[in-house]
Image (spheres, helix red, strand yellow):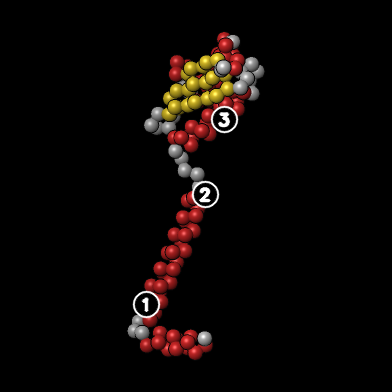
């Protein structure tokens, strides 16, 4: 093994402009390492999509609504405009047959999502 390494080193010495070749190889290796590291960071970084925002907002809103007295179990769906703002909300809740609970739900959604009350629909849940 030592002999092969020595022969290789001798052959490298005969190459013209070996410094440039080695520098180019080092740059290539550095770029490959950088791309590998930056690529793994991208996979761990959450990416914004309207659907991912929707799922997060829907889950948070559902948790909030279910914590309000009288609402009971509920399901939430939010639609978004192209700019990412909430455009409309539909809620089905166990307690929505009570008008006071229904108004609480609409008020909470208006406050949290800044959606006009006319674009919020609340229905009783089966």
Q: Residue at x 45, y 15 (%)?
A: 118
Residue under pointer 2:
44
Sequence-first disc among 2 and 1: 1
Secondary structure beneath dot 1 equals: helix
Q: Position of residue 11 (x, y in %)?
A: 40, 87
Where residue 44 appears, as percent x and y from the top left, is 52, 49
- Residue drawn at x 49%, y 21% is 90
Q: Earlier in the sequence, mark 3 or mark 1?
A: 1
Q: Which mark is residue 60?
A: 3
Left or right, 91 with respect to 68, comes to: left
Q: Secondary structure at mark 3?
A: helix
Q: Nearer the viewer, mark 3 or mark 1?
A: 3
Residue 79 location, x and y as percent? 44, 27
As measured in the structure, the alpha-carbon distance from the residue carrying label 3 to the one carrying label 2 is 22 Å
Residue drawn at 56 percent across, 27 percent down:
61
Would you name the residue on which mark 1 appears? 20
In the rendered structure, the answer to whether residue 99 lies left or right of residue 33 reads: right
Could you tell whether 82 is left or right of 123 in the image?
Answer: left
Which is more N-terminal, label 2 or label 3? 2
Viewer-proximal residue, 114 or 51? Answer: 51
Separation (CA) of disc 2 from disc 1: 37 Å
The image quadrant of residue 12 is bottom left
């Amino acid at each position: 093994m030592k002999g092969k390494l020595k022969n290789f080193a001798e052959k490298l010495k005969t190459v013209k402009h070996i410094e440039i070749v080695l520098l180019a190889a080092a740059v290539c290796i550095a770029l490959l390492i950088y791309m590998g590291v930056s690529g793994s960071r991208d996979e761990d970084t959450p990416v914004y999509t309207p659907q991912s925002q929707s799922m997060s907002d829907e889950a948070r809103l559902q948790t909030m609504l279910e914590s309000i007295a009288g609402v009971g179990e509920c399901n939430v769906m939010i639609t978004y405009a192209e700019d990412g703002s909430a455009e409309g909300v539909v809620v089905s809740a166990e307690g929505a047959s009570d008008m006071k609970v229904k108004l609480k739900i609409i008020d909470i959604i208006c406050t949290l999502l800044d959606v006009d009350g006319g674009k919020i629909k609340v229905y009783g849940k089966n």
